[in-house]
Image (spheres, rainbow, N blue to C red):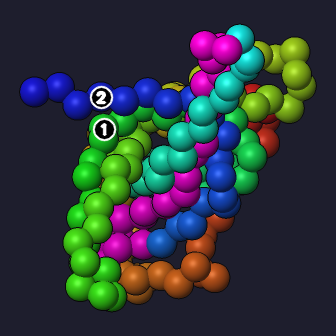
Amino acid sequence: MYNRIILVGNLTRDPELRYMPNGGAVCSTGIATNRKFKKQDGTLGEEVCFVDITFFGRTAEVANQYLKRGKKILVEGRLKLDQWTDQNGGKRSKHSVVVDSMQMLDSKNSNDGENNYNQNNPSSGNYSNQQESYKKPNSQPSVQQSENIPDIDIDEDEIPF
C-alpha cells in the first residue's frame, strides 16, 4: 500500500520541540494550505485546509530552529489517523502528517527562489528523516524541558536564506 502526501503552505503556529525518553527529538506544528476556485455563480471562492504536522530526529531540531509561524514550507510525508477519547468519553479522531522531508520556501532575498535542504549534505538543506533514532549523549538527561533546548551548530555561511 502507498501512503504519501505532499503539502505546500504556511505554518499556523511556532514549532514546539520536545524530546522522547529515548532522546529522540519530536517537533509539532501546523500548516495551512489554500485552494482558490471559481464558483458556479462566477464568484471566486477559497478553501483553506489546516493540517497538524510532526517532525522527528534531526529534522525536528532544524524545524524548531529555523521555522516560525507564517513561514512557507513544502513537506512530504505520510498521512496518519490519530484517535483518542475526550474528557466526556466521546471518541475523537483527526488526520495528521508525519513529515519525512521538508523544504523551506521562504528566502532571505526574494530573488533567491526555493531553498532545497538535504540532510546528507548540510550545505544544501533538504532535511529528510528516514525515521532514524536521534540519540543524545548519555551524559545528558533523557527527557529535556523546552527551556533546555540545545543550539544546533550550523555555520551561518551554510544557510541559503
Give the residues in magenta.
19-41
Q: Residue at x 50, y 30 (%)?
A: 7
Magenta span contains residue 84: no
Q: Quick one: label 2, few (<14), some, or many (20+) residues within 10 Å?
A: few
Q: Image quadrant of residue 155?
A: top right
Q: Secondary structure at mark 2?
A: loop
Q: Secondary structure at mark 1?
A: strand
Q: What secondary structure prevails in the magenta region?
A: strand
Report the residue marked by disc 2: 4
Residue type at tag 2: Arg
Report the residue marked by disc 1: 78
Q: Picture coordinates of residue 147 (x, y %)?
A: 63, 82
Q: Residue at x 37, y 50 (%)?
A: 96
Q: Picture coordinates of residue 54 (x, y %)?
A: 43, 53
Left or right of 7 in this view: 83? left
Residue 143, above or below 3: below
Q: Residue at x 63, y 17 (%)?
A: 39
Q: Quick one: label 1, few (<14), some, or many (20+) residues within 10 Å?
A: some
Residue type at tag 1: Arg
Residue 27, above or below 9: below
Number of disc labels: 2
Which residue is more in the foreground, 156 or 38?
38
Q: Are marks 1 and 2 in contact (CB under 8 Å)?
A: yes
Which residue is more in the foreground, 75 or 117?
75
Extreme-left residue of the structure = 1
Q: CA distance from mark 1 to mark 2?
A: 5 Å
Q: Is residue 108 shown to the viewer in this render?
A: yes
Q: Picture coordinates of residue 83 (x, y %)?
A: 24, 64
